[in-house]
Image (tube, coloured by chain):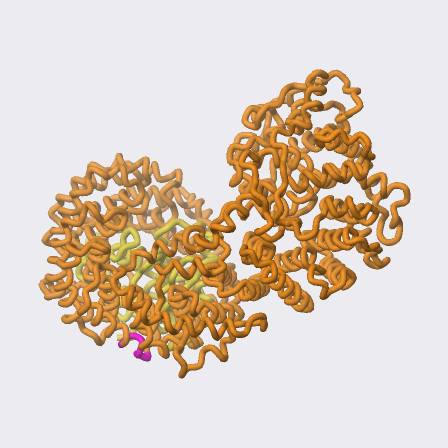
Amino acid sequence: MGSQVGWGTSKEFTDIVKAIGEAKSKAEEERIVTAEIETLKKKIAEPDVPRKKMKEYIIRLVYVEMLGHDASFGYIHAVKMTHDDNLLLKKTGYLAVTLFLNEDHDLIILIVNTIQKDLRSDNYLVCCAALTAVCKLINEETIPAVLPQVVDLLQHPKELVKKKAVMALHRFYQRAPHTVSHLLPKFEKSVCDADPSVTSAALCALFDLITADPRPYKNMTGAFVNILKQVAERRLPKPYDYHGTPAPFIQIKLLKILALLGAGDKPMSDNMYNVLGDVIKKNDTHTNIGHAILYEAICTITSIYPHPKLLETAAEITSRFLKDNNHNLKYMGIDALGRVIKINPEFAEEHQLAVIDCLEDPDDTLKRKTLDLLYKMTRSSNVEVIVDRMIGYMRTINDSHNKTEIASRIIELAERFAPSNQWFIQTMNQVFELAGDLVPTKVAHDLMRLIAEGAGEEDEDADSQLRSSAVESYLQVLAEPKLPSILLQVICWVLGEYGIADGTYSAFDIIAKLCDVIEAHPADDAVKGYAVTAITKICAFEISAGKRVQLLPEYRAVVDELAASHSTDLQQRAYELMTFLDLPADVVATVMPMDASCEDIEIDKSLSFLSEIVETALANGARPYAPEHERMDLGGLGTLIPSTQNGPSSSLKFEAYERPVIPTPVLTPVQPTPLINEFEDQRDRRSLRTPHPSHSISIAPELDLINPESTRLRLDGVQRKWGRQTYSTQSSTTSADRDRSSNGAAGASDRGGSYAKDSGASQYESSRSTDRRKPVEISSEKQKLAASLFGGPSGSRVANTGNAVKPSRTAAHKSQVPRGGEKHQSSRSVPGSGRIADSDTSVPSSAPVPQAPPPDLLDLTDGETGHAAPLNDPFKLLEGLVDPQVGSSSATSAPPVKADVDLMSLYGPGQVISSGDGGSQPSGLTDMSGLPVSPLIGLTGVVVPNTQPGGPSVGKKGPSPQGSLQKDATARQAGVTPTVVNPDLFKDLLG
Amino acid sequence: MTITFVLLVNRQGQTRLAQYYEYLSIEERRALEGEIVRKCLARSDQQCSFVEHRNYKIIYRRYASLFFLVGVDGDENELAILEFIHCVVETLDRYFGNVCELDIMFHLEKAHFMLEEMVMNGCIVEINKQNILTPIQLMDKSSNPQFKLPLSSSTFSVF
């Protein structure tokens, strides 16, 4: 490389490039670059570096960044180099700047002036350099500074400059369409430029414009057709050819544009048929570039209003691609096939075998593309086979991005086309197993709901059969060693709800299984929570059935351990369980009715039962309730709100905190102060910190779905931060008291425990009713509308693909109906036999291949008959929020709900309590934190007395619950000792 | 319908040229390049020249020791991009004459200039080699009348 002279490279530069080039490993490269950075830092800052030397430094900086290190120390020198008079240096400076800086970098402003100057240069190469830089560096704010010059350059005598000016305008359009909206006709003019490269540039811009909205450009169809015709007829100069094909990229661009203009527009499409035929006819079919154009022609033919002859040609070319040995062509063929069969589904049959081959090809890319095709072809007649294939594929991949995508597709298809609930459950189980925690929590909730609601018809038998089979299959699944958390949650819930429903399994069996789950997953609080609540339900069902339930000592020990857990949520659940064991049957039956997860509960939306407390508090000097937005200004309170919604308060606070107002001592029997103290305490400490976005967000987004403007107090973040809450006697008194007032009945005769229990239960129930009510209302309609309207994420897809032109739809039906029916029957004939769709038997290569049945994405009837659980149903989201564990029932028995129920009220008391649970829950568990909402109020009053007098289990295993509570309280005391009561907070809780 | 990046990587996974048409931080680029190269290196010659990675579709082509990778988004004509890569190589070859990895390393800026002529705003705007090379050759002449192209022995040209 020693031949460089003049502006050639110095030895130093040669050495460093050689060293990088010869580096044998990444580590060695790293060492060289790190040393290089040090050298450059010193040298580049020296005064009077010769320009030629500086150019080398700049290129070395480019190397540093290219190899993954920060070279920001030298950016300013690159900026300076753009001022240079020497064209090569200037261009190198611009290049470096475009590589280093993005449009929003602070240094950009220093270059704008240089660019302006260069755009006016007499040397057209300088203009070009500046225009290239404009495309990469100019942001929305600086567009006006260069726009006039760029527009002037559209008239430049040099094509090269004109082309770049067009591209600069294109860039402005991409960045900020409004800045150039008055200049759009310029593109139309440029596209007719005599120079092909200017035309080509203008096509890029027009393509973007037409993609955004084809209507204003319909009248240009003729012009585009004309250009395409001329290009195809080789009217362009030779140098624009590529391997004998005339201007292929211009052809492709034009074909793409025509596809947009002709979509669903017969008159426009009429103009195109001839030229499309020409393009195909004149194309060289032996080169890659020729194939690329043919493929693009297929795309156009299948997008515009269909023309039978052209479609035939398209189908022919597709066959050729599919039959080719070249994998690239096969890949394109699969894609083209997907397009052709959208219009002519019968065409698929011919290529069944080719498709199967591609599906079984070891090449992952090809396999994925084929699965894409199958996904588009899926309908109820072939869903089982296709989903089975997808699951098989999922087994083979590790890439989580890919896995997530496949999982979501499977879920979508299963929800849209599931032939039976049983199949759906099986499929979901497999998806959970394979994709585990990549599956959104909502899917788990949908699954639980499906099991709970059953088919929604008046067919209790079928529903209970479904549940039994779910229980059966889950008990089998439990035997497997490693299960994802989310599946375990579903299993626990189902076992709790229906484990003993059909009498096959005894409560003892189920409880044993659930305890195993708890012991096998010591680190997973969510699963443990689900499991212990499931045990509670089983016990409750047994007690209400009049049986005496006594946990075996080992199970008792498990529960005791949970009761002493660090997670307040688990503590609560464990205490609930213990409480149930000592309650009389009638109480338990009321609190935990069997199979009532879909029942509706009345709620008191105005929280009138709290007004007494509010009045007392006001009378004692508390400030009235201030909604959230007003509270934002009140110092530390702001930090309670998740940081994303509350930018300002997450920053440091420099003023001293406002001295809280001390209310007159509250000495009413209600005595809410201790409880308040605790929150105050938490809140004070909390406010000293910046909020933690990671968990403070967790509940909020979902809650907002329900009631965006709700001004509830969000204590979730607080609690997570500050962990456990002591179940002190005072606080439980308060909550019990509140409950007492909450219960409309006089209830004075009722004593403590059972009483509070009742009201707790009613609230508990009520909290669920709201989220239940909508799904219940819908459930009957769901059967009719399901996948068509709410049909899961597929809804939009249906709409998308829906613009496939419809003329041959009837043909599609003819060809499908018989096969679909056949398939259906064969699958139905083995109900309950585990996996319905078995790939080995159902894809014999000789039999009509199930993948092949022509798709009809417009066919909504399938979605209706399928038992798809609509994914989009916003109300289902609610289900998870409040309580997935208790919720479930047959939809049939659900009574109608009052229309005036207000979701808001749910979160009033809910928030109070959720601050007491949740402890260390990860964000995925938001649904759980909502669960113990009311029971806490009701139960704490009961639990404590019950456990304190040597609760049945104290000291058997692990620390005693009481001890842990005391420890907790002590720890709390050791923290910030609350000295004052925050009256605002007080009202928040009650308001 | 846009190119999001053009990468030249050798068989050891070392980046030789990188041009991004959308902004990614250095760390993101580093991670992306590592993942993509690992994926492409693992593939055989018989397999498709297309790989899906995250939200990108990558079209790659190997010339001796160098991989040319182009990342695209959305509905891009993969075959056309494959040919575009070849066109880039032909252009480099015409400029350097039997282009090799070292040519690109020693004249990184020139390789970039060519690419700047061919791709703007993520769109392919020029494949006419005359149009691509003229400004660069003019610049060479104006900046340095004695400029000569380097000669090199290790070529990866396939022509």
User: In the rendering, at what x and y percent does residue A806 appear?
Assistant: 27, 60
Which chain has been coloured yellow in this picture? B
Q: In this view, does A736 lie to the left or right of B152?
A: right
Nearer to me, A486 or A806: A806
Q: Residue furthest right?
A: A950
Q: Is residue A960 left or right of residue A873?
A: right
The residue at 60%/40% (across/down) is A696
User: In the rendering, at what x and y percent does residue A909 appear?
Assistant: 66, 34
Residue A515 visible, this angle: yes
Residue A717 visible, this angle: no
User: In the rendering, at what x and y percent does residue A306 appear?
Assistant: 21, 63
The residue at 65%/36% (across/down) is A911
Q: Does the magenta stretch include residue A321?
A: yes
A819 over A427 or under it: above or below: below
Query: Which secondary structure is most common in the magenta stretch?
Result: helix
Hey, which quadrant is residue A812 in on the image? bottom left
Nearer to me, A588 or A930: A588
Q: In this view, does A811 lie to the left or right of A891?
A: left
Q: In which quarter of the image is the N terminus of chain A?
A: bottom left
Which chain has been coloured orange in this picture? A
The residue at 54%/66% (across/down) is A423
Q: In this view, does A487 lie to the left or right of B16?
A: right
**Magenta-colored span:** A320-325
User: In the rendering, at what x and y percent does residue B72 appear?
Assistant: 35, 59
Q: In which quarter of the image is the C terminus of chain A?
A: top right
Hey, which quadrant is residue A150 in on the image? top left
Nearer to me, A128 or B60: B60
Q: Residue furthest bottom?
A: A846
Q: Is residue A213 magenta?
A: no
